[in-house]
Amino acid sequence: MNADTSTRRPFERGVADLRAGRRAVLTAAASGLVFSSALGAAEAAGATARSSPKRCYVIVTDGCRPDEITADLTPNLHRLRAHGMWWPRATSMPVMETIPNHVMMMTGHRPDRTGVPANSFYDRALGEVRDMDQPSDIRVGTVIERLNRQGYTTGTVLSKEYLYGVFGDRATHRWEPQPTLPITNHAPDAFTMAALRDMVTEFDPHFCFVNLGDIDRVGHADLTGTTLKVARTAALANTDRLVGQFVDDLKASGAWRHTMLLVLADHSMDWSVPTNVVSLSSGLEADDLLAGHVQIADNGGADLVYWTGPDADREAAIDRIRDIAQATDGVLKAWDRRADWLRLGPEAGEVVVFCQAGWRFSDPDPLTSNPIPGNHGHPATRAIPFFVAGGHPRVEHGARSPRHARTTDVAPTVASFFGLGTGRYEGKARI
Protein backbone atom coordinates (compact mmCIF):
# COMPACT_ATOMS: atom_id res chain seq x y z
CA MET A 1 0.00 0.00 0.00
CA ASN A 2 1.52 3.32 -1.01
CA ALA A 3 1.60 6.34 1.27
CA ASP A 4 -1.22 8.09 -0.57
CA THR A 5 -3.56 5.12 -0.15
CA SER A 6 -2.66 4.49 3.49
CA THR A 7 -3.61 8.02 4.55
CA ARG A 8 -7.08 7.91 3.00
CA ARG A 9 -10.17 7.45 5.13
CA PRO A 10 -12.08 4.16 4.68
CA PHE A 11 -14.73 5.66 2.38
CA GLU A 12 -12.06 7.15 0.13
CA ARG A 13 -10.14 3.87 0.06
CA GLY A 14 -13.30 1.97 -0.83
CA VAL A 15 -14.00 4.19 -3.80
CA ALA A 16 -10.37 3.91 -4.90
CA ASP A 17 -10.55 0.11 -4.63
CA LEU A 18 -13.63 0.06 -6.83
CA ARG A 19 -11.96 2.16 -9.48
CA ALA A 20 -8.75 0.12 -9.37
CA GLY A 21 -10.52 -3.24 -9.49
CA ARG A 22 -9.34 -4.38 -6.05
CA ARG A 23 -12.95 -4.93 -4.96
CA ALA A 24 -15.48 -7.19 -6.66
CA VAL A 25 -18.20 -4.99 -8.14
CA LEU A 26 -21.80 -5.97 -8.66
CA THR A 27 -24.04 -3.33 -10.23
CA ALA A 28 -27.81 -3.47 -9.79
CA ALA A 29 -29.25 -3.26 -13.29
CA ALA A 30 -32.40 -1.44 -12.24
CA SER A 31 -30.70 1.78 -11.19
CA GLY A 32 -26.97 1.51 -11.77
CA LEU A 33 -26.24 1.87 -8.04
CA VAL A 34 -23.01 0.16 -7.05
CA PHE A 35 -22.70 -2.74 -4.63
CA SER A 36 -19.59 -4.68 -3.70
CA SER A 37 -18.17 -7.63 -1.84
CA ALA A 38 -14.57 -7.85 -0.74
CA LEU A 39 -12.70 -10.38 -2.83
CA GLY A 40 -12.75 -13.76 -1.10
CA ALA A 41 -15.32 -12.72 1.54
CA ALA A 42 -17.76 -15.51 0.69
CA GLU A 43 -15.07 -18.17 0.85
CA ALA A 44 -13.73 -16.78 4.13
CA ALA A 45 -17.08 -17.33 5.82
CA GLY A 46 -16.61 -21.07 5.29
CA ALA A 47 -20.29 -21.96 5.67
CA THR A 48 -22.85 -23.85 3.62
CA ALA A 49 -25.35 -21.46 2.04
CA ARG A 50 -28.77 -21.35 3.70
CA SER A 51 -32.03 -21.55 1.79
CA SER A 52 -34.21 -20.13 4.58
CA PRO A 53 -37.11 -17.87 3.49
CA LYS A 54 -36.63 -15.72 6.61
CA ARG A 55 -35.72 -12.11 5.98
CA CYS A 56 -34.79 -9.47 8.54
CA TYR A 57 -34.30 -5.76 7.93
CA VAL A 58 -33.02 -3.37 10.60
CA ILE A 59 -33.80 0.19 9.51
CA VAL A 60 -32.31 3.03 11.55
CA THR A 61 -34.16 6.32 11.16
CA ASP A 62 -31.13 8.29 12.27
CA GLY A 63 -31.89 11.04 14.77
CA CYS A 64 -35.65 10.48 14.86
CA ARG A 65 -37.47 11.45 18.05
CA PRO A 66 -40.20 9.03 19.20
CA ASP A 67 -42.76 11.85 19.37
CA GLU A 68 -42.21 12.53 15.65
CA ILE A 69 -43.88 9.27 14.65
CA THR A 70 -47.51 10.32 14.28
CA ALA A 71 -50.47 9.31 12.12
CA ASP A 72 -50.36 12.63 10.26
CA LEU A 73 -46.62 13.17 9.75
CA THR A 74 -45.31 9.60 9.38
CA PRO A 75 -48.36 7.42 8.62
CA ASN A 76 -46.40 4.40 7.38
CA LEU A 77 -44.12 4.22 10.41
CA HIS A 78 -47.08 4.90 12.69
CA ARG A 79 -49.05 2.05 11.12
CA LEU A 80 -46.12 -0.38 11.34
CA ARG A 81 -45.64 0.51 15.01
CA ALA A 82 -49.35 0.17 15.83
CA HIS A 83 -49.66 -3.21 14.12
CA GLY A 84 -46.39 -4.64 15.46
CA MET A 85 -44.46 -4.77 18.74
CA TRP A 86 -43.59 -1.42 20.33
CA TRP A 87 -41.27 -0.43 23.21
CA PRO A 88 -42.24 3.16 24.22
CA ARG A 89 -39.46 3.32 26.85
CA ALA A 90 -36.63 2.57 24.42
CA THR A 91 -33.37 4.51 24.66
CA SER A 92 -30.01 4.86 23.01
CA MET A 93 -26.94 4.40 25.20
CA PRO A 94 -24.07 6.74 26.18
CA VAL A 95 -22.61 8.43 24.31
CA MET A 96 -25.84 9.08 22.38
CA GLU A 97 -24.10 9.39 19.01
CA THR A 98 -24.43 7.62 15.66
CA ILE A 99 -21.34 5.42 15.45
CA PRO A 100 -21.36 3.93 18.98
CA ASN A 101 -25.06 3.14 18.91
CA HIS A 102 -24.90 1.50 15.48
CA VAL A 103 -22.00 -0.56 16.77
CA MET A 104 -24.01 -1.48 19.89
CA MET A 105 -26.89 -2.56 17.63
CA MET A 106 -24.73 -4.99 15.67
CA THR A 107 -22.59 -6.28 18.55
CA GLY A 108 -25.09 -6.38 21.43
CA HIS A 109 -22.41 -4.96 23.72
CA ARG A 110 -21.61 -1.67 25.47
CA PRO A 111 -18.63 0.50 24.48
CA ASP A 112 -16.28 -0.85 27.14
CA ARG A 113 -16.49 -4.12 25.20
CA THR A 114 -16.78 -2.80 21.64
CA GLY A 115 -14.06 -0.14 21.93
CA VAL A 116 -16.33 2.45 20.29
CA PRO A 117 -17.64 5.03 22.82
CA ALA A 118 -18.40 8.03 20.59
CA ASN A 119 -18.27 9.45 17.09
CA SER A 120 -15.12 11.44 17.83
CA PHE A 121 -12.32 10.45 20.18
CA TYR A 122 -8.70 11.29 20.94
CA ASP A 123 -6.52 8.60 19.38
CA ARG A 124 -3.55 8.44 21.75
CA ALA A 125 -1.48 6.42 19.27
CA LEU A 126 -1.91 9.05 16.55
CA GLY A 127 -1.94 12.02 18.90
CA GLU A 128 -5.04 13.49 17.27
CA VAL A 129 -8.81 13.61 17.50
CA ARG A 130 -10.49 11.53 14.80
CA ASP A 131 -13.77 9.84 13.89
CA MET A 132 -14.16 6.19 14.89
CA ASP A 133 -14.51 5.15 11.25
CA GLN A 134 -11.99 2.32 10.95
CA PRO A 135 -13.13 -1.34 10.74
CA SER A 136 -10.50 -2.20 13.37
CA ASP A 137 -12.12 0.22 15.85
CA ILE A 138 -14.73 -2.48 16.63
CA ARG A 139 -13.02 -4.96 18.95
CA VAL A 140 -15.74 -7.63 19.11
CA GLY A 141 -17.66 -9.69 16.60
CA THR A 142 -20.93 -8.51 15.07
CA VAL A 143 -24.16 -10.38 14.40
CA ILE A 144 -23.41 -9.75 10.69
CA GLU A 145 -20.30 -11.95 10.88
CA ARG A 146 -22.12 -14.52 12.97
CA LEU A 147 -24.86 -14.85 10.35
CA ASN A 148 -22.22 -15.16 7.63
CA ARG A 149 -20.61 -18.07 9.47
CA GLN A 150 -23.97 -19.83 9.64
CA GLY A 151 -24.43 -19.58 5.88
CA TYR A 152 -26.81 -16.64 5.81
CA THR A 153 -26.15 -13.77 3.42
CA THR A 154 -25.98 -10.24 4.78
CA GLY A 155 -26.02 -6.69 3.47
CA THR A 156 -25.22 -3.20 4.70
CA VAL A 157 -26.88 -0.13 3.19
CA LEU A 158 -25.42 2.71 5.25
CA SER A 159 -25.88 6.30 4.15
CA LYS A 160 -23.02 7.84 6.12
CA GLU A 161 -19.38 7.62 5.13
CA TYR A 162 -18.11 6.91 8.64
CA LEU A 163 -20.60 4.06 9.11
CA TYR A 164 -19.47 2.62 5.79
CA GLY A 165 -15.95 2.84 7.19
CA VAL A 166 -16.42 1.30 10.63
CA PHE A 167 -18.41 -1.72 9.40
CA GLY A 168 -16.00 -2.32 6.54
CA ASP A 169 -16.33 -5.57 4.61
CA ARG A 170 -18.22 -7.47 7.29
CA ALA A 171 -21.38 -7.98 5.22
CA THR A 172 -21.69 -10.32 2.24
CA HIS A 173 -22.81 -7.36 0.15
CA ARG A 174 -22.56 -3.68 0.85
CA TRP A 175 -23.66 -0.55 -0.88
CA GLU A 176 -21.02 2.01 -1.71
CA PRO A 177 -22.97 5.16 -0.66
CA GLN A 178 -23.00 7.49 -3.64
CA PRO A 179 -23.68 10.25 -4.29
CA THR A 180 -22.80 11.73 -0.92
CA LEU A 181 -23.52 15.36 -0.20
CA PRO A 182 -20.72 17.79 0.69
CA ILE A 183 -20.48 18.83 4.36
CA THR A 184 -22.99 16.20 5.54
CA ASN A 185 -21.01 13.30 4.00
CA HIS A 186 -24.14 11.22 3.63
CA ALA A 187 -26.24 9.89 0.78
CA PRO A 188 -29.84 11.18 0.66
CA ASP A 189 -32.53 8.74 1.73
CA ALA A 190 -33.91 8.51 -1.81
CA PHE A 191 -30.65 6.92 -2.95
CA THR A 192 -30.27 4.83 0.20
CA MET A 193 -33.72 3.29 -0.09
CA ALA A 194 -33.25 2.77 -3.83
CA ALA A 195 -30.07 0.89 -2.95
CA LEU A 196 -31.91 -1.27 -0.41
CA ARG A 197 -34.66 -2.11 -2.86
CA ASP A 198 -32.11 -2.96 -5.55
CA MET A 199 -30.03 -5.04 -3.14
CA VAL A 200 -33.12 -7.06 -2.23
CA THR A 201 -34.05 -7.48 -5.91
CA GLU A 202 -30.58 -8.44 -7.10
CA PHE A 203 -29.12 -10.40 -4.17
CA ASP A 204 -31.97 -10.96 -1.67
CA PRO A 205 -29.79 -11.22 1.48
CA HIS A 206 -31.31 -12.83 4.54
CA PHE A 207 -30.35 -9.81 6.66
CA CYS A 208 -29.87 -6.12 5.86
CA PHE A 209 -28.68 -3.32 8.13
CA VAL A 210 -29.82 0.09 6.89
CA ASN A 211 -29.08 3.67 7.98
CA LEU A 212 -31.28 6.52 6.74
CA GLY A 213 -29.48 9.80 7.40
CA ASP A 214 -31.76 12.59 6.16
CA ILE A 215 -33.72 13.17 9.39
CA ASP A 216 -30.49 13.51 11.36
CA ARG A 217 -28.61 15.65 8.85
CA VAL A 218 -31.50 18.04 8.29
CA GLY A 219 -32.08 18.18 12.05
CA HIS A 220 -28.49 19.28 12.67
CA ALA A 221 -28.79 22.23 10.34
CA ASP A 222 -32.45 23.16 10.88
CA LEU A 223 -32.45 26.64 12.39
CA THR A 224 -36.20 26.25 12.93
CA GLY A 225 -35.68 23.15 15.07
CA THR A 226 -37.57 24.57 18.04
CA THR A 227 -40.21 26.49 16.06
CA LEU A 228 -41.48 25.68 12.56
CA LYS A 229 -39.36 22.59 11.82
CA VAL A 230 -40.04 23.01 8.11
CA ALA A 231 -37.02 21.16 6.74
CA ARG A 232 -37.15 18.42 9.37
CA THR A 233 -40.86 17.87 8.81
CA ALA A 234 -40.21 17.42 5.09
CA ALA A 235 -37.40 14.95 5.80
CA LEU A 236 -39.57 12.92 8.17
CA ALA A 237 -42.40 12.73 5.66
CA ASN A 238 -40.07 11.71 2.84
CA THR A 239 -38.31 9.02 4.88
CA ASP A 240 -41.69 7.65 5.95
CA ARG A 241 -42.83 7.51 2.32
CA LEU A 242 -39.69 5.64 1.25
CA VAL A 243 -40.02 3.08 4.04
CA GLY A 244 -43.66 2.60 3.06
CA GLN A 245 -42.67 1.89 -0.53
CA PHE A 246 -40.20 -0.75 0.63
CA VAL A 247 -42.84 -2.46 2.76
CA ASP A 248 -45.22 -2.38 -0.22
CA ASP A 249 -42.55 -4.14 -2.30
CA LEU A 250 -42.20 -6.89 0.30
CA LYS A 251 -45.95 -7.39 0.46
CA ALA A 252 -46.32 -7.43 -3.32
CA SER A 253 -43.59 -10.07 -3.69
CA GLY A 254 -45.01 -12.27 -0.92
CA ALA A 255 -41.84 -11.86 1.16
CA TRP A 256 -43.63 -9.96 3.95
CA ARG A 257 -45.01 -13.15 5.50
CA HIS A 258 -41.42 -14.30 6.12
CA THR A 259 -40.12 -10.90 7.25
CA MET A 260 -39.21 -9.21 10.52
CA LEU A 261 -38.65 -5.45 10.21
CA LEU A 262 -37.00 -3.75 13.17
CA VAL A 263 -37.21 0.07 13.09
CA LEU A 264 -35.41 2.26 15.61
CA ALA A 265 -33.18 5.31 15.95
CA ASP A 266 -29.64 5.63 17.24
CA HIS A 267 -30.45 8.78 19.23
CA SER A 268 -32.92 11.65 19.06
CA MET A 269 -32.20 15.37 18.65
CA ASP A 270 -32.01 18.52 20.75
CA TRP A 271 -31.72 22.13 19.57
CA SER A 272 -29.86 25.10 21.00
CA VAL A 273 -29.95 28.83 20.36
CA PRO A 274 -26.67 30.57 19.34
CA THR A 275 -25.99 31.88 22.85
CA ASN A 276 -26.25 28.46 24.54
CA VAL A 277 -22.76 27.24 23.73
CA VAL A 278 -20.43 25.44 26.13
CA SER A 279 -16.68 25.52 25.61
CA LEU A 280 -14.37 23.91 28.15
CA SER A 281 -11.05 24.55 26.40
CA SER A 282 -10.26 27.99 27.80
CA GLY A 283 -11.16 27.06 31.37
CA LEU A 284 -9.07 23.91 31.33
CA GLU A 285 -6.09 25.62 29.71
CA ALA A 286 -6.21 28.41 32.31
CA ASP A 287 -5.55 25.90 35.08
CA ASP A 288 -1.90 25.47 36.12
CA LEU A 289 -2.13 21.68 36.45
CA LEU A 290 -4.10 21.07 33.26
CA ALA A 291 -2.56 23.57 30.85
CA GLY A 292 -1.01 21.76 27.87
CA HIS A 293 -2.04 18.35 29.19
CA VAL A 294 -5.65 17.87 28.08
CA GLN A 295 -7.34 16.97 24.80
CA ILE A 296 -11.06 17.29 24.07
CA ALA A 297 -13.11 15.25 21.62
CA ASP A 298 -16.27 17.27 20.95
CA ASN A 299 -19.39 15.16 20.32
CA GLY A 300 -22.03 17.88 20.20
CA GLY A 301 -23.92 17.09 23.38
CA ALA A 302 -20.92 15.49 25.08
CA ASP A 303 -17.25 16.31 25.52
CA LEU A 304 -14.71 13.55 26.13
CA VAL A 305 -11.74 14.97 28.04
CA TYR A 306 -8.37 13.21 27.99
CA TRP A 307 -5.44 13.69 30.37
CA THR A 308 -2.12 13.56 28.50
CA GLY A 309 0.17 14.56 31.36
CA PRO A 310 2.10 12.42 33.87
CA ASP A 311 0.33 9.36 35.25
CA ALA A 312 1.18 10.48 38.76
CA ASP A 313 -1.08 13.51 38.33
CA ARG A 314 -3.98 11.69 36.69
CA GLU A 315 -6.32 11.47 39.72
CA ALA A 316 -5.77 15.08 40.66
CA ALA A 317 -6.35 16.09 37.05
CA ILE A 318 -9.63 14.18 36.90
CA ASP A 319 -10.90 15.99 39.99
CA ARG A 320 -9.81 19.36 38.57
CA ILE A 321 -11.40 18.72 35.16
CA ARG A 322 -14.69 17.75 36.77
CA ASP A 323 -14.71 20.80 39.05
CA ILE A 324 -14.03 23.23 36.20
CA ALA A 325 -16.56 21.57 33.89
CA GLN A 326 -19.35 21.51 36.47
CA ALA A 327 -18.82 25.20 37.20
CA THR A 328 -19.41 26.03 33.52
CA ASP A 329 -22.79 27.34 32.37
CA GLY A 330 -24.76 24.83 30.33
CA VAL A 331 -23.05 21.72 31.76
CA LEU A 332 -25.40 19.07 33.14
CA LYS A 333 -22.82 16.78 34.73
CA ALA A 334 -19.14 15.87 34.49
CA TRP A 335 -18.54 12.19 35.16
CA ASP A 336 -15.42 10.25 35.91
CA ARG A 337 -15.36 7.97 32.89
CA ARG A 338 -14.92 4.97 35.20
CA ALA A 339 -18.43 5.42 36.64
CA ASP A 340 -20.05 1.97 36.50
CA TRP A 341 -23.17 3.06 34.62
CA LEU A 342 -21.29 4.71 31.74
CA ARG A 343 -19.50 1.57 30.52
CA LEU A 344 -17.45 3.58 28.01
CA GLY A 345 -13.93 2.14 28.32
CA PRO A 346 -10.53 3.85 28.15
CA GLU A 347 -11.09 5.11 24.59
CA ALA A 348 -13.43 7.71 26.14
CA GLY A 349 -10.62 9.36 28.11
CA GLU A 350 -10.81 10.43 31.74
CA VAL A 351 -13.89 12.64 32.06
CA VAL A 352 -17.20 12.60 30.17
CA VAL A 353 -19.14 15.87 30.26
CA PHE A 354 -22.79 16.16 29.23
CA CYS A 355 -24.52 19.44 28.44
CA GLN A 356 -27.99 20.48 29.53
CA ALA A 357 -30.95 20.27 27.18
CA GLY A 358 -30.96 23.26 24.85
CA TRP A 359 -27.16 23.64 24.93
CA ARG A 360 -24.26 22.31 22.86
CA PHE A 361 -20.50 21.95 23.15
CA SER A 362 -18.19 23.81 20.80
CA ASP A 363 -14.56 22.94 21.49
CA PRO A 364 -11.95 24.16 21.08
CA ASP A 365 -13.44 27.35 19.59
CA PRO A 366 -16.84 28.47 20.94
CA LEU A 367 -17.66 30.36 17.73
CA THR A 368 -16.51 28.07 14.92
CA SER A 369 -15.97 24.50 16.17
CA ASN A 370 -19.64 23.53 16.31
CA PRO A 371 -21.97 26.13 14.79
CA ILE A 372 -24.90 23.76 14.13
CA PRO A 373 -28.00 24.18 16.32
CA GLY A 374 -29.12 20.53 16.33
CA ASN A 375 -27.06 18.14 18.47
CA HIS A 376 -27.16 14.88 20.38
CA GLY A 377 -24.91 12.86 22.65
CA HIS A 378 -26.36 14.14 25.94
CA PRO A 379 -29.15 12.62 28.07
CA ALA A 380 -31.82 14.84 26.51
CA THR A 381 -31.40 12.78 23.33
CA ARG A 382 -31.72 9.29 24.86
CA ALA A 383 -35.34 8.53 23.91
CA ILE A 384 -35.73 6.69 20.59
CA PRO A 385 -38.43 4.88 18.61
CA PHE A 386 -38.06 1.09 18.76
CA PHE A 387 -40.57 -1.32 17.23
CA VAL A 388 -40.78 -4.60 15.34
CA ALA A 389 -43.17 -5.22 12.45
CA GLY A 390 -43.60 -7.84 9.75
CA GLY A 391 -45.64 -10.81 8.69
CA HIS A 392 -43.48 -13.53 10.22
CA PRO A 393 -45.24 -15.51 12.99
CA ARG A 394 -42.60 -14.43 15.53
CA VAL A 395 -43.89 -10.87 15.27
CA GLU A 396 -46.80 -10.17 17.61
CA HIS A 397 -49.48 -7.76 16.45
CA GLY A 398 -50.61 -4.75 18.46
CA ALA A 399 -48.22 -5.48 21.33
CA ARG A 400 -46.91 -2.70 23.58
CA SER A 401 -44.21 -3.53 26.12
CA PRO A 402 -43.49 -1.65 29.37
CA ARG A 403 -39.88 -2.90 29.32
CA HIS A 404 -36.87 -0.69 28.68
CA ALA A 405 -35.47 -1.61 25.25
CA ARG A 406 -32.00 -0.42 24.24
CA THR A 407 -29.86 -0.27 21.13
CA THR A 408 -27.88 -3.23 22.48
CA ASP A 409 -31.03 -5.36 22.05
CA VAL A 410 -30.87 -5.38 18.25
CA ALA A 411 -28.17 -8.06 17.80
CA PRO A 412 -29.80 -10.59 20.17
CA THR A 413 -33.20 -9.95 18.58
CA VAL A 414 -31.76 -10.68 15.13
CA ALA A 415 -29.92 -13.73 16.46
CA SER A 416 -33.10 -15.04 18.06
CA PHE A 417 -35.08 -14.56 14.85
CA PHE A 418 -32.59 -16.69 12.92
CA GLY A 419 -32.45 -19.37 15.60
CA LEU A 420 -28.99 -18.56 16.91
CA GLY A 421 -28.16 -18.52 20.60
CA THR A 422 -28.46 -15.18 22.40
CA GLY A 423 -26.49 -15.90 25.58
CA ARG A 424 -23.34 -14.17 24.37
CA TYR A 425 -24.99 -10.74 24.26
CA GLU A 426 -25.42 -8.07 26.93
CA GLY A 427 -28.61 -6.91 25.27
CA LYS A 428 -31.91 -8.81 25.38
CA ALA A 429 -33.81 -10.47 22.54
CA ARG A 430 -37.12 -8.66 22.10
CA ILE A 431 -39.02 -11.39 20.26
Image: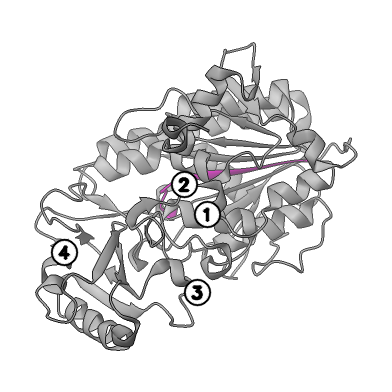
SS class of the residue under badge 3? loop
According to the image, label 2 marks what residue? Answer: 133
Residue 377 lies in the magenta-colored region: no
Structural crowding at the residue carrying mark 3, measured as other residues with C-alpha within 10 Å and reported as few (<14), some (14–19) or many (≥20): some
Residue 62 lies in the magenta-colored region: yes
Q: Nearer the viewer, residue 292 or 349?
A: 292
Residue numbers of the magenta segment: 55-66
- For the point 77% across and 44% down, the residue is 148
- The image's mark for residue 279 is 4
What amino acid is at disc 3?
Arg
The x, y position of residue 277, in whole percent, is 15, 60
What amino acid is at disc 1?
Asp
- The quadrant where residue 174 appears: top right
- The image's mark for residue 137 is 1
Structural crowding at the residue carrying mark 1, measured as other residues with C-alpha within 10 Å and reported as few (<14), some (14–19) or many (≥20): some
**Residue 385 visible in this rendered orientation of the protein:** no
* Sequence-wise first label, 2 or 4: 2
Q: Nearer the viewer, mark 1 or mark 3?
A: 1
